[in-house]
Amino acid sequence: MTTVVAIAGSASLCGFLSLFSSSDIHVPLIFVLTVLIVSRLTEGYFYGIFTSIAAVFGVNYVFTYPYFAFNFTISGYPLTFFTMLAVSIITSTLTTQIKQQEKLRIETEKEKLRANLLRAISHDLRTPLTSIVGSTSAILEGENRLLNDQKRALLQEVRDNALWLIRMVENLLFITRMGGESAIHKQPEVLEELIGSAVCKFRKNYPDMPLRVSVPDEPIFIPADVILIEQVLMNLMENAVVHGKTLTHISLSAVLEEKKGKKGKKVVFSVENDGERIDENTLRHLFDEHYARDDKKGEAGSKRNMGIGLSICMSIVKAHDGDISAENIATGFGGPGGVRFRFSLPLEENL
Amino acid sequence: MSLKDRILIVEDENSIRHFIETVLVSNNYEAIVARTGTEAYSMITSRCPDLVLLDLGLPDMDGLAIIKMVREWSQLPIVVVSARMHERDKVAALDMGADDYMTKPFGPSELLARIRTALRHAKGGDTRSDVAQTGRYQVADLVIDYDKHQVFVSDANVRLTQNEYKIVALLGRHAGKVITYDYLLKAIWGPGLEGNNQILRVNMANIRRKIEKNPAEPEYIFTEAGVGYRLREEE
């Protein structure tokens, strides 16, 4: 199809140009360009070569003396048309080759990325698993020698590690889900329910963590995929607990923002904590798509989940046409402040 | 001495089955197990369990099919266990007649609470209150007075509208169990509104403003994301 359109197009262009000039030097050039375009737009070698041959015969038939008859024998013609054929074919094969190489390169790149991700994940899974195996073996083998308190502490560690593994795996599942078709199912949700269900889940996992929650007084409907937004809120709150070493409080709030001039309203969610701040350099690369990991620092296993969790948060918020950001805050909680994550979701467009 | 309740665990993963079995046996239940759907169905018919704990992801058949088959002839309580991110399965299971669901991972306390609730409702709780809607339901400071059609929080009448009262009353009769949006819509506004739960959400937002201190940190009515609502149960 592309081939036919391209040939017809260049033929009519040549016909149109011949109205203005008796010279026909432009004709072979235009057809070589056609061949280039065809090879760029089609798959494989066939169409390019086919166009080259068709162009040579077509040009000879239509645009050169004698018009509307084949004649390759006039002096100079054999060389001219042979050259045209050769140039066309070489152009087409080179273009196709470059295209195929490009495709191959992208595929190897993807493969490499996937391999890197897998390696990083396997490495990260091993740390908590080793700890689990170690702790449980210690309990099983040293049954009588361990004090009850020691056993309890080991089991606590096992549980924490297992919970971390579950969070990690859930985030990985979200990655595959975000990559798939029909990734999100937006439905009008009530803001307080969105927050409420995340808060309930969080309380279940961290019953002792003080958490302040505030929402607007008015019930607000917001188009969102409740499961995905819940995951964003959970990730942000759990990150705060796991990474904010000196943390004593978390606050989760949502406010309605109206921007004049800009279309529509949006809801801004913030998750604040009074924990340890994030250094500015890390802050800048916090949401980088790739799985961020710093081997030099040799941080504890729990640190590494942050990269994956936050990049999930970002893809979810982006899929809702929202924005996400992180900053260190100076005040709040009547103390030295800590870290604030914010993300916004637009309200329904027709409101 | 009362008979132990017999619970059928349908789960193909050995470690999870073992964990559930241990928890149940140590809490004075009789546990029987099935690894596949066919095995489960034949045990439901031959061993007459008091409750079925059903994993939806079975190797040989869809867990939903078992619910459907059992519901044709029995009201035997079924609690569904599913992995996360299968909200559609959960809702389908509940609409098909499952009594409740649990999301993996869960701990022993949640497991036991769900089982207790389902068994209690099965042993007459539901039917009795469905026939004669009398008496009161109390949890913490919340009282639903079925005789006066009124709801009190800390002894103060919260003055719900008629539909708001109906929602709370219905949740109260099934306290501890999750009630799907569609079920509530149908029960209160009649058929034809399925899938359009906005009206229910607005009513719920108003109820929350009347009975909860902070609507985003509910003490009484919890939202199960994408599924429905659950009223807190007596401890």
Image (cartoon, coloured by chain):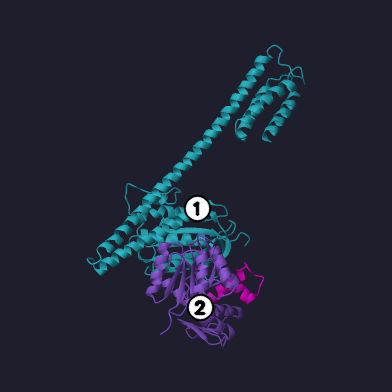
Q: CA distance from mark 1 to mark 2?
A: 36 Å
Q: Residue A206: x percent and y percent?
A: 39, 67
In the image, the segment drawn in magenta is B184-211
On the image, numbered disc 2 is attached to which residue?
B175
Identify residue type, mark 2. Answer: Ala
Tint applied to chain B in the drawing: purple
- Are both tags, 1 and 2, on one chain? no
B118, A29: nearer the viewer: B118
- Look at the numbered disc 1 and give the secondary structure of its residue: helix
Q: Quadrant of the N terminus of chain B?
A: bottom left
Label 1 crowd bin: few (<14), some (14–19), many (20+), radius 10 Å: few
What's the mark number on residue B232?
none
Q: Residue A22: x percent and y percent?
A: 74, 19
Q: Is A80 situated above or below A270? A: above
- Residue B8 as seen in the image, left or right of residue B194: left
Q: Which chain is cyan?
A: A
Task: Indicate yes or no whether the magenta region holds residue A12.
Answer: no
Q: Is A220 situated above or below B29? A: above
Identify residue type, mark 1. Answer: Thr
